Amino acid sequence: MISDRLRQVILKELELDDFPLAETTTANQVPGWDSLSHVKIICAVEKEFSIRFKSLEVLRLSNVGQLQDLVDKKSENR
């Protein structure tokens, strides 16, 4: 399940009022989510959750659920 906190970070960076994000949602399914906004989203997530991603971790992400899992894992290890 996608946390409301992560959902809000993503929607804010994409300047969307609302969009149904699910675990299986991919970037190409979300309006405005391109390569530049992807970088902004990743940076905003790192800042919001006070975590850091490795480049390879980010490259392996294929959907929002995997991003949530990574955030959860990084948050536990702090």
Image: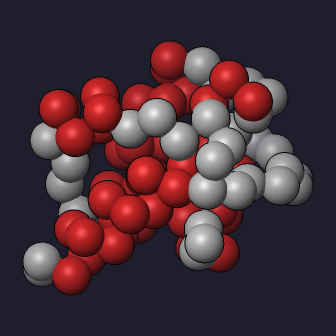
From this view, report whether residue 29 is shown above or below residue 23.
above
Residue 66 drawn at (x, y percent): 43, 52
Q: Quadrant of residue 43?
A: top left
Residue at position x 62%, y 35% from top?
Answer: 26
Above or below, 10 relative to 76: above
Expressed as whole percent of the image width and height from the top left, the position of residue 53 reads 20, 48
- Is residue 10 in view? no
In this image, 47 relative to 51: left or right?
Answer: right
Which color scheme does this rendered protein use?
secondary structure
Q: Position of residue 18 (x, y in %)?
A: 87, 55
The quadrant in which the C terminus is found is bottom left
42 lies above or below 30: below
Which residue is rendered at x = 50% and y = 17% of the image? Answer: 35
Seen at 73% across and 54% down, the residue is 21
State left or right for residue 53 relative to residue 6. Answer: left
Q: Is residue 52 visible?
A: yes
